[in-house]
Amino acid sequence: MRLVIARCSVDYAGRLDAHLPEANRLIMLKADGCVAIHADGGAYKPLNWMNAPNTIVEIDDDDGHRWVVSNHKKETLTITLHEVLSDVSEELGDDPGLQKDGVEAHLQELLAASPTSIEEGLKLVRREYPTAIGPVDLLCRDESDQVVAIEVKRRGEIDGVEQLARYIERLQLDSSLGEVRGVYVAQSIKPQAKVLAESRGFTWVEVDYDELRGMKSDELKLF
Amino acid sequence: MRLVIARCSVDYAGRLDAHLPEANRLIMLKADGCVAIHADGGAYKPLNWMNAPNTIVEIDDDDGHRWVVSNHKKETLTITLHEVLSDVSEELGDDPGLQKDGVEAHLQELLAASPTSIEEGLKLVRREYPTAIGPVDLLCRDESDQVVAIEVKRRGEIDGVEQLARYIERLQLDSSLGEVRGVYVAQSIKPQAKVLAESRGFTWVEVDYDELRGMKSDELKLF
DNA sequence: AGATTGATCTCGGAG
DNA sequence: CTCCGAGGTCAATCT
């Protein structure tokens, strides 16, 4: 990791064109070749960057001192250095990596374990039920034995409803399943997504992740 | 901007839970309060972060030296510092900001200027034609005076077709427009999106951004 | 390698 | 403020 703080201007040419006027910024050069230009504010996203793999060439000419970073996709990032304020390097070594808990996969897991938290009497047929256009998150049967397709999202937005609609269209083609009903499940669902779900004939349920996790541990206590 | 390189372990609790075991990393503290933890590789995304606004509290106790970053949404990022290898600070000042060229808005602009590059005889009615569920990118009339709704995307994927379908559904409710036809325009369109567009009765067109820009400058040369 | 999909998405604009 | 759409989306997963 090399950290250069410098007064610089930057040009990117590739999937689009972008230009940064002269100002003080951090230039971060990672061990794998990644380059990122950061301002002193504005979340974690850099103003400009170039991912690995790439090649860095140093140029000194009439236009001043420049770094030209380019990759095989013909993208180039040109950093013109006007004045270096600070320059430190440090070997960090490999990172053991991030452990996460609470993403969509976990939510689906918890719901598969307690389908009744979605709807009274619901029984799981299987998770990731395959169709030609991708797997349905949960396939269940309700109290009257009707097949229920369930789309699980952490945040319920409009495209999740479209996704569910496409899956159900597919499932209907399999006559052995009979009439298939749709349920849209998320920790919170946007108003527009609720309206669209209803107009498509789906029901929707908002569930609480912590509550589900609590139920799960309660169930575990029984054994 | 303060840049601390340190052997540290990190815990995030908020929208999900995440943990980073002890290792050497960069801790970036921006002037607006943003905090980001970077490894020495892996593109520009940090391993962990906390956006502004937030408050940083320093704690020294039996567990060692820690920074606890928290915001009003009850998210916390806890950084335990085991050994500081480097610590530099620099005032960067405000950034003049990034100038971009080549995004969807420009593509729409160029198409609005030359609708015939989409289809022979097409005339623009207006850009961003409003409907109850959002604006249609371009509304045109064709040679036979039929209304044509056009969805513009840089990359043509399946959700853009759904978007166009929703808009046309809306436009049909306005009887004064008559029968409305749909055209899906993008620099490149995925095969699945082409199939879906056709099955919805839409046509699709792939256009070249550089060529359009060329046409535009050719037109300018005429005057 | 390409396609699909989630993301602590981020970011900006419009209502 | 929220909602919605775009992104040089990125990054993981699978086919």
Image (spheres, coloured by chain):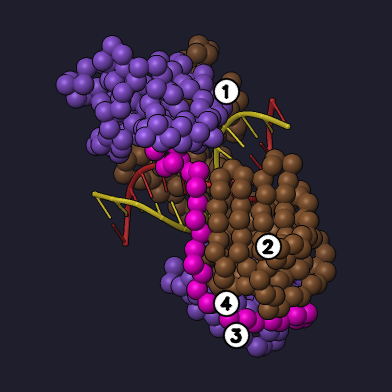
Chain colours: A purple, B brown, C red, D yellow
The residue at 60%/64% (across/down) is B9
Q: Distance between the residues labelled 1 and 4?
A: 46 Å
The residue at 55%/23% (across/down) is A192
Q: In the rendered structure, the residue with mark 3 lies on which chain? A: A
> What secondary structure is marked by label 2?
loop
**Which dot, 1 or 2, sits closer to the camera?**
2
Same chain? Circles 1 and 4:
yes
What's under tag 4, amino acid-wise?
Leu
Q: Distance between the residues labelled 2 and 4?
A: 23 Å
> What secondary structure is marked by label 4?
loop
Crowd rating for badge 2 (residues with CA inside 10 Å; few <14, some 14–19, many 20+) = few
Residue B38 located left or right of residue B187: right
Dot placed on the residue nearer the N-terminal end, 4 or 3: 3
**Which dot, 4 or 3, sits closer to the camera?**
4
Crowd rating for badge 4 (residues with CA inside 10 Å; few <14, some 14–19, many 20+) = many
**The N terminus of chain A: image quadrant:** bottom right
Percent across and percent down for residue A139 are 30, 28
